Amino acid sequence: MAANEELLCLERGGRIECSGPVEYRMMPDNPRSFPRCEAHAERRLEQAQRTLELTSPARAPWYDKAAINEEWDEDE
């Protein structure tokens, strides 16, 4: 990128408006960084954390077997 070139958010023009500075940002589920504004980076981070939580073999901190009458064994 040239020194005088403006960095644009990867998700600009979507349902959520851009806000905050646009910077190259890395997410926990992807080793590459992409230009995102602060609002879109926060949203993407929440999505990545939720996906990692749901696909993890460990029990989620919000899991309550009494609420749904289901059990998970750590060995399964």
Image: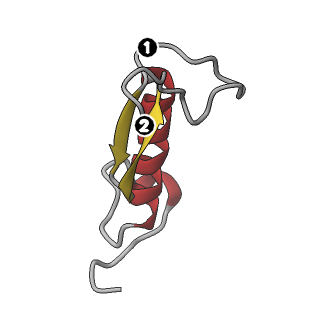
Q: Position of residue 3 (x, y in %)?
A: 36, 25
Label of residue 68 in the image: none
**Residue 51, how many percent across, how many down?**
47, 56
Between 76 and 12, which is closer to the camera in this rendering?
12
Considering only vertical position in the picture, is 36 above or below 52?
Answer: above
What sort of colour scheme is used for the picture? secondary structure
- Relative side of 63 to 47, left or right: left
Disc 2 residue type? Met
Quarter assignment of residue 20: top left
Instruction: Please name the residue that numbered disc 2 is placed on.
Output: 1
Residue at 32 percent across and 79 percent down: it is: 73
| Disc 1 residue type (three-letter) | Gly
The reply to whether discs 1 and 2 touch (Cβ–Cβ < 8 Å) is no
Q: Residue furthest bottom?
A: 76
Give whichever of 52, 74 is nearer the camera. 52
Q: Which label is found at residue 20?
A: 1
Dividing the picture into quadrants, the one containing residue 60 is bottom left
Query: Which of the image's four quarters has the N terminus?
Result: top left
Residue at the (36%, 48%) spot, across then down: 27
